[in-house]
Image (cartoon, grey):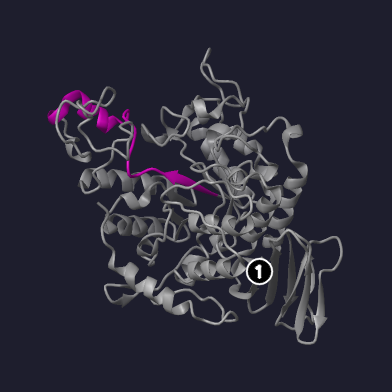
Amino acid sequence: MKKEYPRRKFVKELSLAASSMAISNPIWGNASTKNNGIPLEINTPDWVKNAVFYQIFPERFGKSERTLHPPEIQFAPWGSDASLREFQGGDLYAVIEKLDYLKELGINAIYLNPIFKAPSPHRYNTYDYFQVDPILGGNKAFKELLDKAHERDIKIVLDGVFNHCGRGFWQFNHILELENRSPYLGWFKIKGFPLRAFSFSDDNPAQYMYWQRFPLLPEFNTDHPGARAFLFKVAKHWIDFGIDGWRLDVATDIEDDSFWQEFRTLIKAANPEAYIVGEHWQEATHWLGGDMFDGVMNYIFSSTAMGFFGARTLKNYNYSHWPFQTYDAPGFKNKIENNLKLYDWEITQTMLNILGTHDTPRAIEILGYDRTALKLCALFQMTMPGAPCVYYGDEIGLKGHRREAFPYDDSKKWDAQLLGFYKGIIGLRNTYVSLRTGKYTTVYARGEVFAFERKTDSETAIVAFNASMASASCRIDRNAKDFEQVWPEIGSKRFKARGKQILLSLPRRDAVVLIKKE
């Protein structure tokens, strides 16, 4: 059973009260987060606020000839059916070989799915937390990846699986062999003996706690001092090795605030700029008060964006924990503003804004293969507060399974126009500071036209979208003087001055970005 978290009620009431604000008021976020009645000074890594992430599923991103495998080792053909969960031989040397591609794309941070020794392509069932899987190239390949990425000013964030491990994890194997004679008995949640880790049924259960419905994932007892110390040792080891942060798998399933508070203290002492981002699919106020995570994977962002820009084609797709609904512009405005008011501004800027991930269908599939919807979602992602994260292959129009092999050696399968679009919008974010750290204000929301302002002391951006199937115009109460159109870079000018207003002319299913230097 999940715990009740009293902090949530306070923040929800604050959000509801704030929702009555006028459309022209800037969204500052909740700055009143408290811990035991004491205001917390919330600090998050500055580099994340300026980052564009790229998520890589290492087993399927690329296959390098540099990785030396034992003789006769067999892999499934590259690009074969990803749903079969076979190893296709992806490795970290291939990521190294694609660093220049990522740099040219505009990426300055990589989030890697698990890389440690494990008997599955996804590697969430870890055997050894101190050894990178030799199929991926081992610790040597990872060290080279870190060094080469850092030379290019690209950060590396690893996927940390601390809620559970694999059945081959040494301490769990010790219990399988010795049962209640094992000194590691307290590391896991054992119900009785014999343990049935590989042969179990309703009548003959596994007899230990595991994650959801998967006995291949024994859950750690994080209350046990030995297990806790081991996991903290792992976390600090890789920070000392040189990684730039942790993405924490099913983080909120560890229902112990003190675990994550100690984790944060340990990691931030080793590297104050390390990024700590949790996996959580809903509102996450409880964990984002400045004492646990810097942000979470922002699934609320993705479902909201796709609900507006993909309203016509949105696939009938729902997880109970990731609901979708469609919006017109006023409904979209309300949802976006409520989302932005959930957290302190420091936290909002370091939320990981995603569209699709390794756990969801690809965004293009959810959007009913509407390419215009994907492009509008992606531009929105690159112009909103928070750190955008591109899931590998989305930029080239990769379709199929969410863990499909990237056609790294066959650019004929790439959507070159879409790749150029992604380079353009990522470049836009990297060029203009207002799109990265500017305060947010909605400035227009009628019908299917939506516009907002991002503002810093030195720069102002106006971003406007037309999600309708017909051209549209709108007036925004801002002086057009000194604004220039930076997106699209080519084509006709889409704005005019009308007194103290900006008159925008927007083609169907398109957008415009204006910039003014202060």
Q: Residue at x 72, y 30 (%)?
A: 410
Q: Is residue 165 magenta?
A: yes
The image position of residue 219, as x and y in percent, is 28, 40
Quarter of the image where one finds residue 33: bottom left
Quarter of the image where one finds residue 230: top left
Q: Is residue 502 left or right of residue 270?
A: right
Tell me if I can see residue 203 in this picture: yes
Does residue 205 lie above or below 23 as drawn? Answer: above
How many marks overall? Answer: 1
Q: Identify the residue at the far right of this view.
A: 492
The image position of residue 46, as x and y in percent, is 53, 64
**Which residue position is annotated with label 1?**
447
What's drawn in magenta, residue-wise?
Answer: 156-181
Does residue 441 lie above or below 432 as drawn? Answer: below
Q: Residue at x 48, y 30 (%)?
A: 121
- Where disc 1 sits, the SS reads loop
Q: Is residue 440 magenta?
A: no
Does residue 182 lie above or below 107 as drawn? Answer: above
Q: Identify the residue at the far top of this view.
A: 72
The image position of residue 298, as x and y in percent, is 49, 56
Amino acid on which disc 1 is placed: Gly
Q: Identify the residue at the far bottom of this view.
A: 499
Q: Is residue 383 left or right of residue 245?
A: right
The image position of residue 24, as x and y in percent, is 60, 81
Q: Residue at x 44, y 61 (%)?
A: 294
In the image, 513 versus 433, the foreground residue is 513
Q: Residues within 10 Å of mark 1 (few under 14, many from 20)?
A: some
